[in-house]
Amino acid sequence: MIVRTTEEITGTERDVADPLGNWVSKRIVLGGDRVGFSFHETTINAGSVNNFHYANHIEAVWLVEGTGTLLDKETGITYPLAPGTMYLLNGHERHQVTAQTRLRMLCVFNPPVVGTEVHDENGVYPLVTVPEPVGGPTPEAVSAD
């Protein structure tokens, strides 16, 4: 069993900020946890426009706070974003997220992100292989025994 809080992730290598200051991704579950996906809490700042393209990952997003728009850059269709909205990038769609207010999202990636990825100039994360474990479970894992 793994138990983590966003409080304990804050300020660690799992707390990743956009170099432009538009978003922060708290990477709660990563590839090294060996569960087949990664799970993130992403916060996007109000007024920002963000271009993403996960060419190597499928991403599911559940919006829990804020309003904005999602532009599917493949079709030109714009969707409203509000709490309770889910979108699934199952076709590796290039997309743009515009935050009218601060957005807080819960995101799942498959294959899992390992934590060292950064967006390239096209908004793409590279596909990084999960390193083999050395000597047992990850040190961040907390046992409930």
Image (cartoon, grey):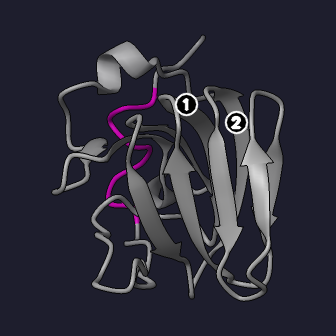
Q: Is residue 54 visible?
A: yes
| Quadrant of the image containing the N terminus | top right
Q: Is residue 132 above or below residue 106?
A: below
Nearer to the camera, 145 or 23:
23
Taking the spot 38% from the left edge, 48% from the top edge, the residue there is 48
Nearer to the camera, 8 or 62:
62
Mark 1 belongs to which amino acid? Arg
In the rendered image, residue 130, in percent from the top left (x then y), is placed at: 44, 72
Taking the spot 55% from the left edge, 67% from the top edge, the residue there is 96
| Res 84 label | none
In the rendered image, residue 57, in percent from the top left (x then y), is placed at: 61, 77
- Disc 1 designates what residue? 104
In the rendered image, residue 33, in percent from the top left (x then y), is placed at: 51, 50
In the rendered image, residue 26, in percent from the top left (x then y), is placed at: 40, 37
Taking the spot 20% from the left edge, 34% from the top edge, the residue there is 12
- Disc 2 designates what residue? 63
Q: Is residue 98 above or below residue 68?
A: below
- Specify start and end residues of the magenta stretch as a single range: 133-141
Left or right of residue 88: residue 133? left
Which comes before the other along the chain, label 1 or label 2?
2
